[in-house]
Image (cartoon, rainbow, N blue to C red):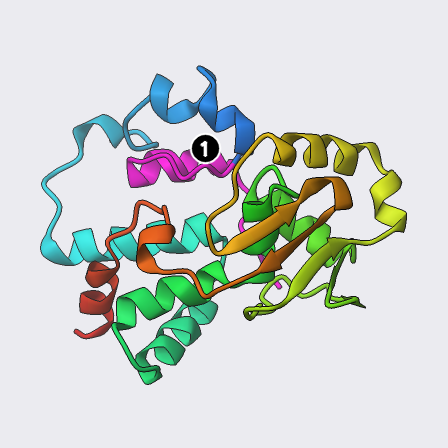
């Protein structure tokens, strides 16, 4: 599937917010939005007042870019969220959070969602003992995600496991960093999803 392959710092500047697309670099003084906190391009510093539609569009684009998915796929998630019981916007974020690549990132086995997606695609993880190389695979409560035995010998995974052990995963996940595995214990609540997204704007956009 096609993916954006350009400079990701440009995306953060376009949205006017840190999207944490480059992992640890986003927490340093090298972060592009800290150094140049305006939109990219020739007229980036002279942006005009944005319309209501523009605000809604930017929020949708921000969500897409945080989770690294394409337009059609994002629309499919929205339609699925709309069919579920509950609040559509919250349902949408819960679906995005349950993606395998996001769960791997949340557990700390990927420095960014982009790296986590690549590691999943390369077959480094199992779900309930079976290899899964589909980043969009939706996990459910009770699922156990592990780094494959062969992959644990790679220095990168040793580094990631050490870093993960020093962090606290979201409450809906359990982590055993020394065992290179994590478990999904619940569907995340909206309060446990710490992404800078106002999902009601996305619902309003698609409701036009």
| Image position of 202 with respect to 51: above or below | below
User: Which residue is painted at 27% across and 53% down in the image?
Assistant: 59
What range is drawn magenta here?
1-21
Q: Which quadrant holds the N terminus? A: bottom right
User: Which residue is painted at 69% across and 41% down in the image?
Assistant: 177
Q: Which quadrant holds the C terminus? A: bottom left
Question: Magenta span has 9?
Answer: yes
44 left or right of 204 in image: right
150 left or right of 83 in image: right
Residue picked out by circle 1: 9
Residue 133 in which image quadrant? bottom right
> In the rendering, at what x and y percent does residue 17 appear?
31, 36
Question: Magenta span has 141?
Answer: no
User: Which residue is painted at 62% across and 47% down in the image?
Assistant: 175
> In the rendering, at what x and y percent does residue 67 appear?
47, 53
32 left or right of 129 in image: left
> In the rendering, at what x and y percent does residue 94 appear?
40, 64
156 left or right of 51 in image: right
Residue 206 in which image quadrant? bottom left
Disc 1 crowd rating (10 Å Cα; few below 14, some 14-19, many 20+) is some
Most common SS among magenta residues: loop
User: Which residue is painted at 56% across and 54% down in the image?
Assistant: 103
The answer to which of 11 and 126 lies nearer the viewer is: 126
Q: Dot 1: what SS?
A: helix
The answer to which of 196 and 38 lies nearer the viewer is: 196
The answer to which of 129 and 90 lies nearer the viewer is: 129
| Image position of 134 with respect to 160: above or below | below
């Amino acid at each position: 599937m096609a993916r954006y392959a350009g400079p990701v710092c440009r995306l953060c500047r376009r949205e006017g917010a840190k999207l944490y697309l480059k992992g640890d670099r986003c927490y340093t003084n090298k972060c592009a939005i800290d150094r140049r906190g305006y939109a990219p391009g020739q007229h980036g510093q002279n942006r005009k007042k944005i319309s209501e539609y523009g605000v809604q569009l930017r929020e949708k684009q921000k969500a897409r870019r945080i989770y690294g998915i394409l337009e059609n796929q994002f629309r499919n998630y929205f339609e699925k969220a709309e069919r579920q019981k509950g609040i559509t916007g919250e349902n949408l974020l819960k679906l995005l959070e349950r993606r395998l690549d996001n769960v791997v990132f949340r557990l700390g086995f990927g420095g960014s969602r982009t790296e986590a997606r690549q590691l999943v695609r390369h077959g480094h993880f199992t779900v309930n003992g079976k290899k899964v190389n589909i980043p969009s695979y939706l996990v459910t409560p009770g699922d156990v995600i592990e780094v494959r035995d062969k992959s644990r010998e790679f220095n990168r995974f040793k580094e990631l496991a050490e870093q993960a052990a020093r962090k606290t995963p979201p409450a809906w996940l359990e982590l055993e960093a020394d065992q290179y595995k994590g478990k999904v214990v619940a569907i995340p609540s909206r309060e446990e999803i710490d992404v800078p997204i106002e999902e009601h704007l996305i619902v309003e956009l698609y409701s036009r």
